[in-house]
Image: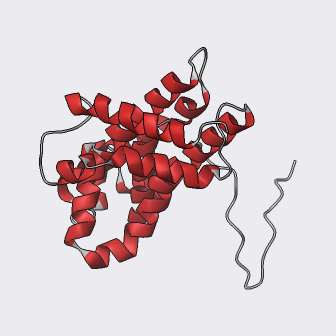
């Protein structure tokens, strides 16, 4: 049986075949782990694709085949960090948890993310280089903070649908909740103060934020 050739396009160049060797998920995970470590330790500008490939134990060809370029790798590394702290399941899998307990679990994960070494390194990196912030800041925001806000808004919309809270604008409510949870902890972490998810003030802070949030969006 004769193999059918891919159709030609103007100029005589055949389009790339869509079927190829599947990407190795183990290599992808190793690359992302290496990239996260290097971006935190060295920053975006000083992290080379060659260094990431070496740290991950893969070839540069493998690295580029998975992520395309350095910006694509950075985007996926940011997304992986956000999903590591706040996976989709944490927003939707309540089980038998009541509303307050469910929000407490999400709140702890948000605080852990925004005070984690990856987020603090990014804040410091962008503060130190305004040009870099304008170039890759939107990529960082969309892959990290914006994704978390959308997940939080969807969670709050479902809570409102159940009639547990009165939330006319879930997206704005998500912004309120996340900004309140950041509090002063992000500033303290950026300036090297001892804080984070194990800080004894965190639980008091989370409880205070949820008291305020639940009162503001209580059913009328």
Q: Is residue 34 above or below residue 172?
A: above
Residue in front for this viewpoint, 22 or 36: 36
Tell me where residue 119 appears, x and y as whole percent.
30, 50
Residue displayed at 50% across by 60% down: 142
Up/down of 50 relative to 56, above or below = below
- Counting labels gives 0
Percent position of residue 59, x then y: 35, 51
In percent of width and height, residue 28 lies at: 44, 43
Query: Which of 67/37 is in front?
Result: 37
Q: Is residue 100 left or right of residue 40?
A: right
Question: To which quarter of the image does residue 201 belong?
Answer: top left
Query: Looking at the image, which residue sits at the far right?
Result: 1
Tell me if residue 152 can be seen: yes
Q: Nearer the viewer, residue 217 or 102?
A: 217
Residue at figure coordinates x 18%, y 39% from the top left: 195
Visible residue check, residue 47: no
Its colouring scheme is secondary structure
In which quadrant of the rendered image does the C terminus lie?
A: top right
Name which residue lies at 66% across and 36% down.
219
Q: Residue at x 31, y 28 (%)?
A: 203
Q: Residue farthest to the top?
A: 96
Q: Position of residue 121 (x, y in %)?
A: 23, 54
Residue found at the far bottom of this picture = 11
Say above or below: 82 vs 7.
Answer: above
């Amino acid at each position: 049986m004769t193999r059918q050739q891919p159709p030609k396009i103007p100029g005589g160049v055949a389009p790339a075949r869509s079927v190829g060797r599947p990407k190795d998920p183990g290599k992808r995970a190793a690359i992302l782990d290496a990239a996260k470590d290097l971006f935190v330790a060295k920053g975006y500008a000083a992290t080379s694709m060659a260094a990431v490939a070496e740290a991950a134990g893969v070839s540069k060809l493998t690295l580029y085949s998975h992520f395309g370029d350095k910006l694509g790798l950075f985007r996926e590394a940011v997304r992986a960090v956000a999903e590591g702290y706040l996976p989709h399941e944490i927003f939707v899998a309540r089980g038998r948890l009541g509303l307050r307990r469910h929000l407490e679990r999400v709140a702890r994960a948000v605080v852990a993310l925004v005070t984690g070494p990856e987020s603090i390194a990014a804040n410091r990196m962008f503060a130190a280089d305004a040009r870099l912030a304008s170039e890759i800041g939107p990529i960082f925001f969309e892959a990290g903070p914006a994704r978390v806000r959308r997940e939080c808004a969807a969670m709050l919309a479902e809570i409102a649908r159940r009639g547990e809270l009165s939330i006319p604008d879930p997206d704005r409510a998500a912004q309120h909740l996340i900004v309140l949870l950041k509090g002063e902890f992000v500033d303290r972490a950026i300036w090297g103060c001892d804080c984070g998810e194990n800080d004894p003030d965190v639980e008091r802070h989370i409880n205070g934020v949820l008291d305020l949030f639940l009162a503001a969006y209580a059913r009328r």
